[in-house]
Amino acid sequence: YDGSDVSRHQYPFVPGHVAYWTPLSLVKLASDAGCFVDFRTPEMGLRRGGPRKKYIIFYRSIEVFYRVSLYFGTRMFAPSEKG
């Protein structure tokens, strides 16, 4: 977010997008729901969508926590649609 008037932006209002949530607000949301949250950059975010594009992963299971950590321990980016 560049700090300009949000009502003049089209992106936040495109169906299917989660836009302009701060990491702290999503951590609070996850915590209130009994979940963990993780943020990952999709490979496509380097070419299109900009550096703010993130995949947001919510989960409750410690097993999923470990699996996500192990997966990204060997990969720099999340898989993504073709850009």
Image (cartoon, rainbow, N blue to C red):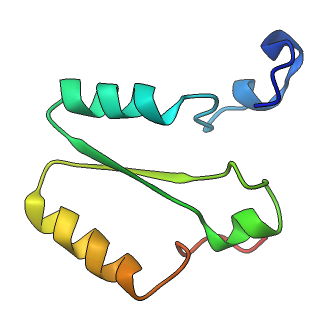
Q: Quadrant of the N terminus?
A: top right
Instruction: Name the spot of residue 17 as percent of width and height, x first.
Output: 63, 37
What residue sits 84% from the left and 26% below the top? 10
What residue sits 27% from the left and 33% below the top? 30
Position above or below: 38 against 35 = below
Instruction: Name the spot of residue 34 as percent of width and height, x first.
Output: 14, 34
Farthest residue in the bottom direction? 74
Q: Is residue 30 left or right of residue 26?
A: left
Quarter-wise, where is residue 79 in the image? bottom right
Q: Quadrant of the C terminus?
A: bottom right
Q: Is residue 5 left or right of residue 35?
A: right
Instruction: Name the spot of residue 63 as percent of width and height, x first.
Output: 11, 67
Instruction: Name the spot of residue 7 as percent of width and height, x first.
Output: 82, 11
Q: Is residue 27 left or right of residue 4?
A: left
Position above or below: 72 against 45 = below
What residue sits 28% from the left and 80% below the top? 70
Position above or below: 9 against 19 = above
Farthest residue in the left direction? 62
Across the whole image, how many numbered discs are drawn on residues? Answer: 0
What residue sits 52% from the left and 72% below the top? 78
